[in-house]
Image (spheres, rainbow, N blue to C red):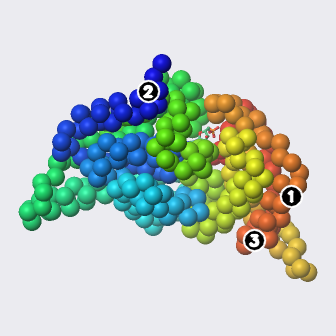
Amino acid sequence: KWTMEEFIGKEIARIRQICGPKGRVIGAVSGGVDSTVAAKLMHEAIGDRFHAIMVDNGVLRLNEAKQVHTMLNRDLGVNLTVVDASELFFSRLADVEDPEQKRRIIGNTFINVFEEVAAKIEAAAEAEERVGGEPKGKIEWLLQGTLYPDVIESISFKGPSATIKTHHNVGGLLKDMKLKLIEPLRELFKDEVRALGRLLSIPAPLVQRHPFPGPGLAIRILGPVNREQVQILQKADAIYIEEIRAAGLYEQISQAFAVLLPVRAVGVMGDKRTYEQVIALRAVQSEDFMTADWFIFPADVLKKISSRITNEVAGINRVTYDISSKPPATIEWL
Ligand code: XMP
Protein backbone atom coordinates (compact mmCIF):
# COMPACT_ATOMS: atom_id res chain seq x y z
CA LYS A 1 0.00 0.00 0.00
CA TRP A 2 1.33 3.41 -1.01
CA THR A 3 1.62 6.37 1.33
CA MET A 4 0.43 9.88 0.54
CA GLU A 5 4.02 11.16 0.78
CA GLU A 6 5.03 8.70 -1.93
CA PHE A 7 2.05 9.78 -4.00
CA ILE A 8 3.12 13.43 -3.83
CA GLY A 9 6.68 12.62 -4.89
CA LYS A 10 5.60 10.40 -7.76
CA GLU A 11 2.90 12.75 -8.98
CA ILE A 12 5.23 15.77 -8.95
CA ALA A 13 7.78 13.79 -10.97
CA ARG A 14 5.05 12.70 -13.40
CA ILE A 15 3.80 16.28 -13.86
CA ARG A 16 7.33 17.56 -14.51
CA GLN A 17 7.90 14.84 -17.05
CA ILE A 18 4.72 15.40 -19.04
CA CYS A 19 5.06 19.21 -19.02
CA GLY A 20 8.72 19.12 -20.06
CA PRO A 21 11.14 21.94 -19.20
CA LYS A 22 9.04 24.78 -20.65
CA GLY A 23 5.42 23.63 -20.93
CA ARG A 24 2.83 25.78 -19.20
CA VAL A 25 -0.46 24.85 -17.58
CA ILE A 26 -3.59 26.81 -16.71
CA GLY A 27 -6.46 25.81 -14.49
CA ALA A 28 -9.63 27.19 -12.97
CA VAL A 29 -9.84 27.45 -9.20
CA SER A 30 -13.02 27.88 -7.22
CA GLY A 31 -11.87 27.96 -3.62
CA GLY A 32 -13.07 24.38 -3.18
CA VAL A 33 -10.90 21.54 -1.92
CA ASP A 34 -10.24 19.76 -5.21
CA SER A 35 -9.18 22.72 -7.32
CA THR A 36 -7.08 24.13 -4.47
CA VAL A 37 -5.23 20.87 -3.85
CA ALA A 38 -4.69 20.36 -7.59
CA ALA A 39 -3.38 23.93 -7.95
CA LYS A 40 -0.98 23.61 -5.03
CA LEU A 41 0.37 20.33 -6.41
CA MET A 42 0.99 21.99 -9.80
CA HIS A 43 2.76 24.84 -8.07
CA GLU A 44 5.03 22.40 -6.24
CA ALA A 45 5.79 20.67 -9.53
CA ILE A 46 6.32 23.54 -11.99
CA GLY A 47 6.11 26.77 -9.98
CA ASP A 48 4.95 29.80 -11.97
CA ARG A 49 4.58 27.81 -15.16
CA PHE A 50 1.23 26.92 -13.65
CA HIS A 51 -1.25 29.79 -13.81
CA ALA A 52 -4.51 29.61 -11.87
CA ILE A 53 -7.58 31.60 -12.87
CA MET A 54 -10.48 32.40 -10.59
CA VAL A 55 -13.60 33.81 -12.19
CA ASP A 56 -15.63 35.93 -9.78
CA ASN A 57 -19.14 35.37 -11.14
CA GLY A 58 -20.80 37.64 -8.56
CA VAL A 59 -22.65 34.72 -6.95
CA LEU A 60 -19.89 33.53 -4.64
CA ARG A 61 -20.17 33.57 -0.86
CA LEU A 62 -19.35 36.64 1.24
CA ASN A 63 -15.74 37.81 0.61
CA GLU A 64 -14.96 34.54 -1.14
CA ALA A 65 -12.95 35.90 -4.07
CA LYS A 66 -10.77 37.90 -1.70
CA GLN A 67 -10.26 34.93 0.62
CA VAL A 68 -9.28 32.62 -2.22
CA HIS A 69 -6.83 35.22 -3.49
CA THR A 70 -5.21 35.58 -0.07
CA MET A 71 -5.00 31.87 0.55
CA LEU A 72 -3.87 30.65 -2.87
CA ASN A 73 -1.64 33.52 -3.88
CA ARG A 74 -0.27 35.02 -0.69
CA ASP A 75 -0.21 31.97 1.58
CA LEU A 76 0.38 29.13 -0.87
CA GLY A 77 2.36 31.09 -3.46
CA VAL A 78 0.29 30.00 -6.45
CA ASN A 79 0.42 32.22 -9.54
CA LEU A 80 -3.20 33.43 -9.68
CA THR A 81 -5.38 35.82 -11.66
CA VAL A 82 -8.75 36.72 -10.15
CA VAL A 83 -11.10 38.29 -12.65
CA ASP A 84 -14.21 40.14 -11.52
CA ALA A 85 -16.77 39.28 -14.20
CA SER A 86 -19.78 39.87 -11.97
CA GLU A 87 -21.27 42.62 -14.17
CA LEU A 88 -21.34 40.31 -17.16
CA PHE A 89 -22.91 37.47 -15.17
CA PHE A 90 -25.55 39.74 -13.62
CA SER A 91 -26.43 41.26 -16.98
CA ARG A 92 -26.95 37.83 -18.52
CA LEU A 93 -28.90 36.58 -15.50
CA ALA A 94 -31.26 39.55 -15.36
CA ASP A 95 -34.90 38.43 -15.02
CA VAL A 96 -34.03 34.75 -15.41
CA GLU A 97 -35.98 32.53 -13.00
CA ASP A 98 -35.67 29.07 -14.49
CA PRO A 99 -33.09 26.99 -12.56
CA GLU A 100 -31.68 25.15 -15.57
CA GLN A 101 -31.44 28.36 -17.55
CA LYS A 102 -29.49 29.92 -14.67
CA ARG A 103 -27.10 26.96 -14.75
CA ARG A 104 -26.64 27.20 -18.52
CA ILE A 105 -26.00 30.94 -18.45
CA ILE A 106 -23.47 30.66 -15.64
CA GLY A 107 -21.72 27.70 -17.27
CA ASN A 108 -21.46 29.34 -20.68
CA THR A 109 -20.42 32.72 -19.32
CA PHE A 110 -17.77 31.02 -17.21
CA ILE A 111 -16.31 29.38 -20.34
CA ASN A 112 -16.32 32.71 -22.22
CA VAL A 113 -14.54 34.55 -19.41
CA PHE A 114 -12.02 31.79 -18.74
CA GLU A 115 -11.03 31.52 -22.41
CA GLU A 116 -10.63 35.27 -22.67
CA VAL A 117 -8.37 35.43 -19.61
CA ALA A 118 -6.33 32.44 -20.83
CA ALA A 119 -5.80 34.19 -24.17
CA LYS A 120 -4.62 37.33 -22.37
CA ILE A 121 -2.15 35.37 -20.28
CA GLU A 122 -0.77 33.76 -23.44
CA ALA A 123 -0.53 37.12 -25.22
CA ALA A 124 1.27 38.71 -22.27
CA ALA A 125 3.84 35.90 -22.29
CA GLU A 126 4.45 36.35 -26.02
CA ALA A 127 4.90 40.10 -25.60
CA GLU A 128 7.46 39.50 -22.88
CA GLU A 129 9.37 37.20 -25.20
CA ARG A 130 9.52 39.85 -27.91
CA VAL A 131 11.18 42.38 -25.63
CA GLY A 132 13.90 39.87 -24.94
CA GLY A 133 12.62 38.17 -21.81
CA GLU A 134 13.31 34.53 -21.32
CA PRO A 135 11.20 32.68 -23.91
CA LYS A 136 8.14 31.07 -22.39
CA GLY A 137 6.52 27.88 -23.55
CA LYS A 138 3.01 27.84 -24.90
CA ILE A 139 0.05 27.04 -22.68
CA GLU A 140 -0.49 23.43 -23.66
CA TRP A 141 -2.20 21.94 -20.67
CA LEU A 142 -5.38 22.42 -18.71
CA LEU A 143 -5.46 21.33 -15.09
CA GLN A 144 -8.57 19.46 -13.99
CA GLY A 145 -9.35 18.53 -10.39
CA THR A 146 -11.10 15.31 -11.49
CA LEU A 147 -11.38 12.69 -8.74
CA TYR A 148 -11.65 8.93 -9.07
CA PRO A 149 -15.42 8.91 -8.50
CA ASP A 150 -15.78 11.35 -11.41
CA VAL A 151 -13.70 9.03 -13.55
CA ILE A 152 -15.83 5.99 -12.80
CA GLU A 153 -18.98 8.15 -12.66
CA SER A 154 -20.50 6.06 -9.90
CA ILE A 155 -21.10 8.47 -7.07
CA SER A 156 -20.23 11.58 -9.03
CA PHE A 157 -22.55 14.48 -9.72
CA LYS A 158 -22.79 13.16 -13.26
CA GLY A 159 -24.58 10.10 -11.87
CA PRO A 160 -28.32 9.53 -11.65
CA SER A 161 -29.10 13.03 -10.42
CA ALA A 162 -27.80 14.45 -13.70
CA THR A 163 -31.18 13.55 -15.13
CA ILE A 164 -32.82 15.75 -12.48
CA LYS A 165 -30.60 18.77 -12.82
CA THR A 166 -27.44 19.45 -14.79
CA HIS A 167 -24.57 19.78 -12.37
CA HIS A 168 -22.01 22.17 -13.66
CA ASN A 169 -18.78 22.49 -11.83
CA VAL A 170 -16.01 24.87 -12.58
CA GLY A 171 -13.47 22.47 -14.04
CA GLY A 172 -15.73 20.14 -15.98
CA LEU A 173 -16.97 22.87 -18.31
CA LEU A 174 -13.61 23.50 -19.94
CA LYS A 175 -12.98 20.06 -21.39
CA ASP A 176 -13.59 21.31 -24.94
CA MET A 177 -10.75 23.83 -24.94
CA LYS A 178 -7.96 22.92 -27.34
CA LEU A 179 -5.69 21.96 -24.48
CA LYS A 180 -4.47 18.63 -23.21
CA LEU A 181 -5.84 17.61 -19.82
CA ILE A 182 -3.71 17.07 -16.77
CA GLU A 183 -5.56 15.38 -13.91
CA PRO A 184 -3.32 14.79 -10.88
CA LEU A 185 -6.17 13.71 -8.57
CA ARG A 186 -7.77 11.17 -10.88
CA GLU A 187 -6.79 8.19 -8.72
CA LEU A 188 -7.98 9.68 -5.45
CA PHE A 189 -11.17 9.63 -3.41
CA LYS A 190 -12.41 12.71 -1.61
CA ASP A 191 -11.00 11.74 1.79
CA GLU A 192 -7.62 11.12 0.14
CA VAL A 193 -7.72 14.56 -1.47
CA ARG A 194 -8.34 16.00 2.01
CA ALA A 195 -5.36 14.08 3.43
CA LEU A 196 -3.24 15.29 0.50
CA GLY A 197 -4.39 18.85 1.15
CA ARG A 198 -3.29 18.65 4.77
CA LEU A 199 0.16 17.40 3.71
CA LEU A 200 0.42 20.29 1.25
CA SER A 201 -0.30 22.75 4.11
CA ILE A 202 -3.70 23.80 2.86
CA PRO A 203 -5.55 25.39 5.81
CA ALA A 204 -7.78 22.98 7.76
CA PRO A 205 -11.04 24.96 7.38
CA LEU A 206 -10.68 24.76 3.61
CA VAL A 207 -9.83 21.08 3.59
CA GLN A 208 -13.03 20.31 5.55
CA ARG A 209 -15.27 22.68 3.64
CA HIS A 210 -18.81 21.72 2.61
CA PRO A 211 -19.39 21.41 -1.15
CA PHE A 212 -20.49 24.55 -2.97
CA PRO A 213 -22.20 24.30 -6.37
CA GLY A 214 -20.62 25.82 -9.48
CA PRO A 215 -23.67 28.06 -10.17
CA GLY A 216 -23.26 29.37 -6.64
CA LEU A 217 -25.84 31.54 -4.94
CA ALA A 218 -27.77 31.85 -8.20
CA ILE A 219 -29.40 28.49 -7.45
CA ARG A 220 -30.05 29.53 -3.85
CA ILE A 221 -31.97 32.64 -4.81
CA LEU A 222 -35.42 31.57 -5.94
CA GLY A 223 -36.56 34.02 -8.57
CA PRO A 224 -34.43 36.61 -10.36
CA VAL A 225 -30.79 37.07 -9.36
CA ASN A 226 -29.29 40.51 -8.92
CA ARG A 227 -26.60 42.15 -6.80
CA GLU A 228 -29.07 43.25 -4.09
CA GLN A 229 -30.52 39.77 -3.64
CA VAL A 230 -27.02 38.27 -3.59
CA GLN A 231 -25.93 40.67 -0.86
CA ILE A 232 -28.89 39.76 1.34
CA LEU A 233 -28.24 36.04 0.91
CA GLN A 234 -24.47 36.40 1.45
CA LYS A 235 -25.03 38.08 4.82
CA ALA A 236 -27.59 35.54 6.01
CA ASP A 237 -25.46 32.62 4.86
CA ALA A 238 -22.33 33.98 6.56
CA ILE A 239 -24.17 34.35 9.88
CA TYR A 240 -25.60 30.85 9.55
CA ILE A 241 -22.21 29.22 8.89
CA GLU A 242 -20.49 31.32 11.55
CA GLU A 243 -22.98 30.13 14.18
CA ILE A 244 -22.72 26.51 13.03
CA ARG A 245 -18.96 26.71 13.46
CA ALA A 246 -19.29 28.48 16.82
CA ALA A 247 -21.55 25.68 18.04
CA GLY A 248 -18.95 23.11 16.95
CA LEU A 249 -21.39 21.47 14.52
CA TYR A 250 -19.77 22.21 11.15
CA GLU A 251 -18.09 18.84 10.78
CA GLN A 252 -21.18 16.87 11.78
CA ILE A 253 -23.09 18.43 8.90
CA SER A 254 -22.39 17.45 5.29
CA GLN A 255 -23.73 20.64 3.76
CA ALA A 256 -25.41 23.74 5.21
CA PHE A 257 -26.52 26.91 3.48
CA ALA A 258 -29.17 29.61 3.40
CA VAL A 259 -31.74 30.07 0.63
CA LEU A 260 -33.48 33.33 -0.25
CA LEU A 261 -37.19 33.02 -0.94
CA PRO A 262 -38.65 35.72 -3.18
CA VAL A 263 -41.88 35.94 -1.24
CA ARG A 264 -42.71 38.61 1.27
CA ALA A 265 -44.14 38.14 4.72
CA VAL A 266 -45.50 40.56 7.27
CA GLY A 267 -43.56 41.28 10.43
CA VAL A 268 -43.20 43.88 13.13
CA MET A 269 -40.18 45.91 14.15
CA GLY A 270 -40.52 48.30 17.09
CA ASP A 271 -44.06 49.47 16.53
CA LYS A 272 -43.81 49.38 12.74
CA ARG A 273 -45.17 46.89 10.27
CA THR A 274 -42.59 45.29 7.97
CA TYR A 275 -43.19 43.44 4.72
CA GLU A 276 -40.03 41.63 3.75
CA GLN A 277 -38.38 38.52 2.35
CA VAL A 278 -37.85 35.13 3.95
CA ILE A 279 -34.69 33.07 4.49
CA ALA A 280 -34.85 29.28 4.54
CA LEU A 281 -32.03 27.39 6.26
CA ARG A 282 -30.90 24.01 4.98
CA ALA A 283 -28.56 21.53 6.69
CA VAL A 284 -28.16 17.89 5.71
CA GLN A 285 -26.18 14.83 6.61
CA SER A 286 -25.26 12.61 3.70
CA GLU A 287 -22.78 9.90 2.74
CA ASP A 288 -22.66 10.53 -0.99
CA PHE A 289 -25.13 13.39 -1.63
CA MET A 290 -27.42 11.03 -3.52
CA THR A 291 -29.65 10.75 -0.45
CA ALA A 292 -29.65 13.02 2.57
CA ASP A 293 -31.33 13.51 5.94
CA TRP A 294 -32.09 16.91 7.36
CA PHE A 295 -29.97 17.76 10.36
CA ILE A 296 -31.46 18.02 13.85
CA PHE A 297 -30.12 21.21 15.43
CA PRO A 298 -30.13 21.94 19.14
CA ALA A 299 -32.96 24.45 19.55
CA ASP A 300 -30.77 27.15 21.09
CA VAL A 301 -28.51 27.17 18.03
CA LEU A 302 -31.46 27.70 15.66
CA LYS A 303 -32.80 30.38 17.97
CA LYS A 304 -29.55 32.33 17.90
CA ILE A 305 -29.20 32.00 14.12
CA SER A 306 -32.74 33.19 13.52
CA SER A 307 -32.44 36.13 15.86
CA ARG A 308 -29.13 37.22 14.36
CA ILE A 309 -30.39 36.98 10.76
CA THR A 310 -33.58 38.95 11.39
CA ASN A 311 -31.69 41.58 13.41
CA GLU A 312 -28.61 41.95 11.23
CA VAL A 313 -29.81 41.39 7.68
CA ALA A 314 -31.86 44.25 6.27
CA GLY A 315 -34.68 42.97 4.07
CA ILE A 316 -35.34 39.76 6.04
CA ASN A 317 -38.02 39.50 8.73
CA ARG A 318 -38.59 35.75 8.89
CA VAL A 319 -36.44 32.60 9.00
CA THR A 320 -37.63 29.04 8.39
CA TYR A 321 -35.86 25.68 8.70
CA ASP A 322 -36.16 23.15 5.88
CA ILE A 323 -37.14 19.71 7.25
CA SER A 324 -37.16 17.83 3.93
CA SER A 325 -35.01 14.80 3.22
CA LYS A 326 -33.62 13.74 -0.15
CA PRO A 327 -35.60 12.15 -1.69
CA PRO A 328 -38.17 13.51 -2.28
CA ALA A 329 -36.53 16.95 -1.98
CA THR A 330 -33.08 17.57 -3.45
CA ILE A 331 -30.34 19.16 -1.35
CA GLU A 332 -30.38 22.47 -3.25
CA TRP A 333 -33.76 24.16 -3.74
CA LEU A 334 -33.12 24.65 -7.49
P1 XMP B 1 -28.92 18.07 -5.26
O1 XMP B 1 -29.51 19.43 -5.13
O2 XMP B 1 -28.96 17.52 -6.64
O3 XMP B 1 -27.39 18.26 -4.89
O4 XMP B 1 -29.48 17.10 -4.24
C1 XMP B 1 -26.46 17.22 -4.70
C2 XMP B 1 -25.09 17.86 -4.53
O5 XMP B 1 -24.72 18.49 -5.75
C3 XMP B 1 -24.50 19.86 -5.55
N1 XMP B 1 -24.97 20.57 -6.76
C4 XMP B 1 -24.18 21.07 -7.70
N2 XMP B 1 -22.84 21.10 -7.78
N3 XMP B 1 -23.02 22.27 -9.81
C5 XMP B 1 -22.27 21.72 -8.83
O6 XMP B 1 -21.04 21.82 -8.92
C6 XMP B 1 -24.39 22.25 -9.81
O7 XMP B 1 -25.02 22.76 -10.72
C7 XMP B 1 -24.98 21.62 -8.68
N4 XMP B 1 -26.27 21.43 -8.32
C8 XMP B 1 -26.25 20.77 -7.13
C9 XMP B 1 -25.25 20.23 -4.30
O8 XMP B 1 -24.71 21.40 -3.71
C10 XMP B 1 -25.07 18.98 -3.48
O9 XMP B 1 -23.79 18.96 -2.85
Q: Distance between the residues labelled 1 and 2?
A: 43 Å
The tag on residue 312 is 3
The three-letter amino acid code for the residue at tag 3 is Glu
Q: Of label 2 and label 3, which has the lower sequence position?
A: 2
Where is 311 relative to 326, above or below? below
The residue positioned 36% from the left and 33% from the top of the image is: 9
Instruction: Compare residues 142 and 206 and report the one nearer the observer.
Output: 206
Across and down, in percent, residue 271 comes to 91, 81
Tell me the crowding category of disc 3: few under 14, some 14 to 19, or many 20 or more residues within 10 angstroms, Cα based: few
Instruction: Compare residues 317 and 307 and report the one nearer the observer.
Output: 307
Instruction: Compare residues 179 and 20 and report the one nearer the observer.
Output: 20
Where is 323 relative to 153, above or below? below
Q: In which quarter of the image is ligand 1?
A: top right
Label 1 or label 2, whichever lies nearer to me, is 2
Across and down, in percent, residue 231 comes to 62, 67
Cβ of mark 2 under 8 A from ligand 1: no
Across and down, in percent, residue 28 comes to 39, 49
The three-letter amino acid code for the residue at tag 2 is Glu
The residue at which mark 1 appears reads as 303
Q: From this viewpoint, which residue is outermost toward the bottom?
A: 271
Residue 117 vs residue 258: left or right? left
Is the C-beta separation of discs 1 and 2 under 8 Å?
no
Q: Determine which quarter of the picture holds residue 63.
A: bottom right
